[in-house]
C-alpha cells in the first residue's frame, strides 16, 4: 500500500521547526490484554450498530511512540498523556490515550513491529474534509466536531473515572458520529448500547454506561455543543490514514503539544515524518 500522501496534502503541511498541526507518523498495531496504565480503561458491553448487534470492548486505547523524544519533553500534566506500566515492550514509555472514531472499520493488526501503519495528524476541518471525500460509511458530515467536543470537554473525567466512564465516552463518540440527534435511549438510533441481553452483569454495565453518556449529552446540549464559534484545533488531534480514511481505524486524542506537533528541523520537510511509534490498544471486537 502506498503510504506517501499526495502532493496536495504535502504542500498544505510544509513548514520548518514547530508549526500548526501536520505530519505523519507510523504505528505498529497490537491488540490483546496488555495492562497500560489507565489507557485501556473500558469494558465489554453489548451494543448495536446499524442492523447488527455486537458485544465488544468499548473504551480507551494508547498510542505508544517508540521515539522518546516525541513526548518526553512534555510535562506530566500535558493533556491526555499516560505512562505504560505493562512490564513488557512499553514499560515506562509515555503515550497518548485516545478513542476510536470509525466504529465500522477494524484496525489492521499485526504481531510484528515491522508491519507499521502510517497516520496523519489532522485538525477537525482537515479530518472532516477527508471523511467526506473518502466516503466514510454512514458518517454524518460535520459530526467529527461533536466527537471533538466530547473528548475536549469530558476526557479528563472519563480517564480519571475508570472503566465505566471510558466506555461511556467511547459510546458517546460513536453515537454522535452516527445519529443527528444523539441520545442513548435503548433501541433508538443507528448506534446505541443495549441493556436487553438477559445477562444481568452486561445489562447493568450498559445502564451505567448510558447514564454517564446521557449526562454528558445533556451538558453538551445546554452548551449548544460549544456554540457556533467552537474550534478545538489547539486541543484535539485526529489521526487518519494518509491514503484513505476508510483503510484503517481512525483515532481521536487530546493534543499534548497544545496545538503544535513537533517536526525536527533535521528531517526532510517533504517526508513529514516526525517519529516512529507503536500502538497498544484494546479494540472493539465484533461478536
Image (cartoon, helix red, strand yellow):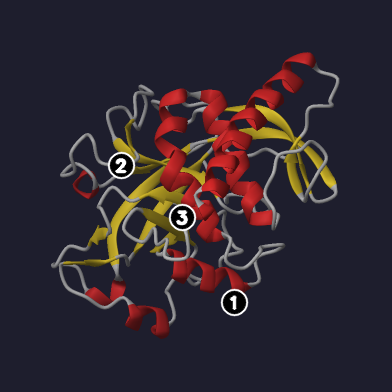
Q: Is residue 210 visible?
A: yes
Q: Residue furthest front?
A: 222
Camera-near label (2 vs 3) is 3
Circles 3 and 1 in contact, beta carbons < 8 Å: no
* Residue 79 tag number: 2
Identify the residue shown where x is 25% and y is 60%: 260
Q: Name the residue rendered at 77%, 51% in the picture.
A: 190
| Coordinates of residue 197 in the picture (x, y in percent) | 84, 25
Q: Is residue 78 left or right of residue 230?
A: left
Residue at label 3?
226
Does the CB distance between marks 2 and 3 fall below 8 Å? no
* Above or below, 244 relative to 59: below
Q: Mark 3 falls on what kind of element?
A: helix
Query: Left or right of 41: which side holds 53?
Result: right
The local crowd at label 2, few if under 14, some if 14 to 19, many if 20 or more residues have their Cα within 10 Å, is many
**Disc 2, SS:** loop
Picture residue at 48% right of the left edge, 61% below the top: 240
Q: Is residue 116 above or below residue 36?
A: below
For marks 3 and 1, give the CA distance.
26 Å
Q: Quadrant of residue 170?
A: top right
Separation of residues labelled 1 and 2 (CA atoms): 30 Å
**Pointer 1 or 2: first along the chain:** 2
Percent from the top left, x then y, of residue 235? 34, 53
Q: Earlier in the sequence, mark 2 or mark 3?
A: 2
Q: Nearer the viewer, residue 16 or 78?
A: 78
Image coordinates for residue 188, horizontal then vertical, percent: 80, 44
Query: Residue 133 bears which disc, if any?
Result: 1
- Which of pointers 3 and 1 lies earlier in the amino acid sequence? 1
- Screen quadrant of the C terminus: top right
- Which sits in the foreground, 145 or 5? 145
Amino acid at each position: 500500500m502506498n503510504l506517501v500522501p499526495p502532493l496536495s496534502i504535502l504542500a498544505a503541511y510544509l513548514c520548518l521547526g514547530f508549526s500548526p498541526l501536520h505530519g505523519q507518523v507510523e504505528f505498529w498495531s497490537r491488540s490483546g490484554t496488555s495492562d497500560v496504565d489507565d489507557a485501556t480503561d473500558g469494558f465489554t458491553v453489548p451494543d448495536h450498530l446499524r442492523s447488527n448487534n455486537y458485544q465488544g470492548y468499548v473504551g480507551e486505547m494508547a498510542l505508544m511512540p517508540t521515539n522518546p523524544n516525541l513526548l518526553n519533553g512534555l510535562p506530566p500534566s500535558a493533556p491526555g498523556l499516560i505512562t505504560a506500566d505493562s512490564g513488557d515492550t512499553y514499560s515506562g514509555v509515555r503515550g497518548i490515550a485516545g478513542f476510536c472514531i470509525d466504529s465500522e472499520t477494524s484496525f489492521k493488526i499485526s504481531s510484528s513491529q515491522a508491519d507499521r501503519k502510517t497516520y496523519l495528524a489532522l485538525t477537525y476541518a482537515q479530518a472532516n474534509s477527508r471523511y467526506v471525500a473518502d466516503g466514510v460509511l454512514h458518517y454524518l458530515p460535520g459530526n467529527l466536531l461533536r466527537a471533538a467536543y466530547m473528548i475536549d470537554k469530558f476526557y479528563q473525567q472519563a480517564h480519571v473515572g475508570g472503566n465505566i466512564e471510558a466506555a461511556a465516552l467511547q459510546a458517546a463518540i460513536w453515537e454522535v458520529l452516527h445519529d443527528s440527534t444523539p441520545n442513548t435511549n435503548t433501541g433508538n438510533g443507528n448506534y446505541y448500547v443495549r441493556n436487553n441481553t438477559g445477562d444481568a452483569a452486561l445489562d447493568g454495565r450498559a445502564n451505567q454506561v448510558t447514564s454517564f453518556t446521557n449526562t454528558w449529552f445533556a451538558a453538551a446540549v445546554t452548551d449548544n455543543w460549544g456554540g457556533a464559534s467552537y474550534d478545538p484545533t489547539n486541543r484535539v488531534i485526529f489521526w487518519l490514514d494518509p491514503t484513505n480514511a476508510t483503510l484503517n481505524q481512525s483515532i481521536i486524542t487530546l493534543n499534548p503539544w497544545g496545538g503544535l506537533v513537533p517536526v525536527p528541523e533535521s528531517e526532510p520537510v517533504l517526508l513529514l515524518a516526525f517519529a516512529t511509534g507503536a500502538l497498544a490498544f484494546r479494540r472493539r471486537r465484533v461478536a
